[in-house]
Every structure is written in C-alpha cells, then in structure tokens.
Amino acid sequence: MKPVTKVASPAAIAVLRQATALFPKRKKLSDGLLPSLAHQKANPNSDHNTGLAVDLTHNPKNGIDCAVIFEKLKEDERVDYLIYDKKIWSRARRKEGNRKYTGSNPHVKHLHISINATHRSDTSPWFWWLNQPKVVNQMVAKLQPTPKKKVAKVAPMGVLCTCCKVHNTKRKAI
C-alpha cells in the first residue's frame, strides 16, 4: 500500500487551478486530488494516496476536452501515466501507445493524471498549447496585487522620531 498523504502535491493542485483559470465556467463534479477512505481501501496503490494524482472533469462544452488533453499531456515529462475513456497510456510503456484500461472505473467522466514524483513541485503551465502562460500570469497578478510603496515620513521639527527603535533623537533644523 502506498503511504497516504494529507496534502496534494503542488503540481497536482496546479492542474486544477490552471484549468479553472483558463475555463472559469468548467464543471468540477469529477475533479479530485486526495482519496476518500473507500478509494484508499479499493485502490491501495493509487497515486492519489501520495498526492501525485489529479482527476480533471471532462467538460468540452466549457473548455475541458479530456480527449484532447489526454493526447497533449503525453508530451509532458511530468506525466507518469494517463487514464481516460477506457484507455491508459504510460511513460514506461509509451512505445505500446494507448492500451485498454480494465480497472473498475472506466474514467469516462474524467481524466486521471499521475505525476512523476521528481516533478511534484513543478507548477509550470499544464495547458501550454492553449497559450496558458499569459492567462495564468494574469490570474496570478489579480491574486497578488503589486504592493504599495512605503513613503518615508519625516517628523516635524522638535518632535521625537518614532519611525523605528534604532534612534530616538529630536530632528534639528539645518
């Protein structure tokens, strides 16, 4: 059994955040990061247990076409394996191409993405073919506004300086 973590990897979280930034109206019904207890028991070796897997809801009407994403992410070195619509593709067996997936969940409502552990902290764009860097940078800019510059205040003549605790002198006229 793979160890169960309480926190998903930054890379897995980034998949969902970036998908939502690109397509804010997308459905999220089958999205998933960490496993439920039932999932852990049924799938003790799931990458969801380690925080290295993410499920992305198939919603082509609102921009998320998992069939397209399944094909594109084969090019991404961060991906260990993908499962979608009764098919599995893995980096380890990539020469075989897509294989028939016979697991209990056929993955027709979502794409399963398993991330290579060496890339667990990589949050670079997951949807690069959609000109994502520009969109994600705009999203980050909205979330983190530019801090205001601090303007130094000068104490009036004859008043003790209270700008810091380093000095405690009266300002003198020049």
Image (cartoon, grey):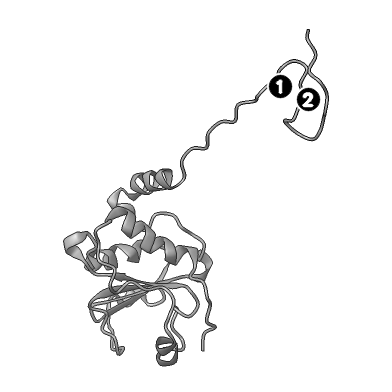
Kindly indicate the quadrant of the structure image that contains residue 69: bottom left
Give residue 87's mark. none
Q: Residues within 10 Å of mark 2 (few under 14, many from 20)?
A: few
Q: Residue at x 81, y 33 (%)?
A: 166
The answer to whether 65 appears left or right of 113 in the picture is left
Q: Position of residue 41 (x, y in %)?
A: 44, 92
The residue beneath circle 1 is 155
Q: Residue furthest top?
A: 174
Q: Amino acid at mark 2?
A: Leu
The answer to whether 147 appears left or right of 42 in the picture is right
The answer to whether 153 appears left or right of 11 in the picture is right
The alpha-carbon separation of the residues under discs 1 and 2 comes to: 7 Å
Q: Residue at x 37, y 77 (%)?
A: 93
Q: Position of residue 137 (x, y in %)?
A: 40, 45
Q: Nearer the viewer, residue 117 or 91?
A: 117
Task: Determine the secondary structure under disc 1.
Answer: loop
Q: Residue furthest left?
A: 61
Task: Determine the secondary structure under disc 2.
Answer: loop
The residue beneath circle 2 is 160
Say if 143 sits above or below 119 in the image.
above
State which tag comes first along the sequence, 1 or 2.
1
How many marks can you see? 2
